[in-house]
Image: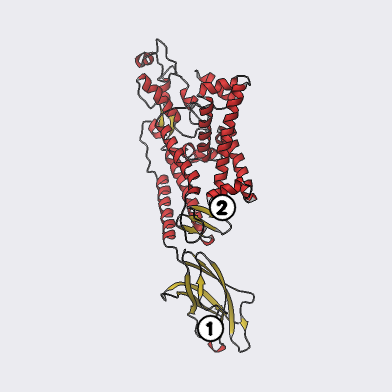
Amino acid sequence: MSNVSTTAQINAHGVVPRSVKGRFRRIKSTILFIAYFVYFGLPWLGWERTVGPDRAVVFDIGARKFYLFDLVVQPQQIFWLTGLLLIAALLLFFVTGIAGRIFCGYFCFQTLWTDLFFMLERWVQGERPARLRLAQQSWNAEKLFKKGLTSALWLLAAFWTGFTFTLYWGSGTASEMLVNFLTGEAHHAVYITTLILTTTTFVMAGLARENVCMHMCPYSRFQAVMFDKNTKLVTYDQARGEGEQGRAKVTKALKSLPQRHAAGVGDCIDCGFCVQVCPTGIDIRDGLQISCIHCGLCIDACDQIMESRGWDKGLIRFASEAEAQGGKTRHFTLKNLGYGVSILVVTAVLFWSVAHQSEVDVSISQIRQPLYVTLSDGSIQNSYEIKLTNDTSTPKDYRLGITGLAQAVLDTGEIRDIHLKPLQHLMIYAKVRRPAAAQHAMDKIADFRFTLTATATGEVVAEIPARFYTP
């Protein structure tokens, strides 16, 4: 099929990609399998806990806790999310600087789900020529059946995608949530969320498909600013493929390489296979384009043709501008090293923070209206709100005290010993009084500390600085 006719069919019927075998297709399929296994499987994975849902991963909004295996993330630890987002952004910049838009080609949700929808379409309607014939023929029983079955499978995949997403946010088991959903007993938010995700998945992966990458995705618009001459991109070897007289199909007179080179013709036989397998329908021979997601399927297609003819592979390959000009690709540039070091530093800090989280989180805020009170005996009183959170899955017992403030007395009302249940939040209203004899004329502000001591061991587990104000 010539390039002109291939492009015409793409314009008439949308992108109708052809399947291809090769190393990049195997990589995509492996990542696809792993991603689906993780996404669809995690909500069904059980996990024993003394407190909380018995599932491995749950984002419990009602309880304001995220359960990630043995790790429990509470609101005061939200900065961990900031660390994860920072790592993700730096990793995206780092990978883009080295190998272009391979995130788009292999890891993007749009790519993963569109790939699945392409597979379902091909399973029902056949390979590319059969799908094109089906699109061109008039509506009959065969077309209605195949188009209807394709849409039904897409809708089923979209629904299971949306429902799986809601499973991550429910506190019950996955089977209980499924039964509640099917019997109409689930919360209305579950139905709304599932409907929204089902609709958007069906539209984006089944109908919009390549248009998301070409017209909607903002990443494709600013990707070029992260490329440099050492970035490896999917590249067509123009000199080898075109020769002096351009590309030409295989004929009796242009069958072997010596014949083609003698005629000034390049190695590209203009088969159009690289265009047919492209999920966005572009022709990589036209150069770098905003719609290229660097999936490498055109490399598999071209290598397959070159191998069948006994010619060298690599007419289309990952190559940098420096390599195309006869130089060497330098991956360890200052920019890439900066991104790499930043990723390592942020990752190390995040892991350290998770590994060294305290067993109890304590925060103290002083009540400022009024800032202080003068009692009838002349002593000064300051009031404080103390918030404690047990970050462990076991009960804890503590005593609260103060240090560094001479002759001061701590009053916590009827609370003597603090008992925190697993993952419990507790607020204590505390008063600190100091006799008039202990005040100094020039000492308007005195620094001291609240101490939290484990009842069982006598160990001070937390010291929180505070201030005592006098008139």
Q: In the rendered structure, which amino acid carries the disc numbered 1?
A: Val
Residue at image x 52%, y 58%? Answer: 78
Q: In the rendered view, tell whether residue 328 sits above or below residue 272.
A: below
Q: In the rendered view, tell whether residue 228 sits above or below residue 74.
A: above
Label 1 element class: strand
Residue 421 in picture, x, y percent from top left: 51, 68
Residue at image x 37%, y 25%? Answer: 313
Residue 368 in picture, x, y percent from top left: 62, 74
Between the residue at mark 2 and the residue at mark 1, the CA separation in whole angstroms equals: 46 Å
Work out which quarter of the rendered image holds the C terminus and state it.
bottom right
- Seen from the viewer's position, the closer of residues 420 and 185 is 185
Quarter occupied by residue 336: top left
- Identify the disc placed on residue 170: 2
N-terminal-most mark, 2 or 1: 2
- For disc 1, the neighbor class at 10 Å (few under 14, some 14 to 19, many from 20) is some
Which residue is farthest top? Answer: 252
Q: To which residue does mark 1 refer?
A: 409
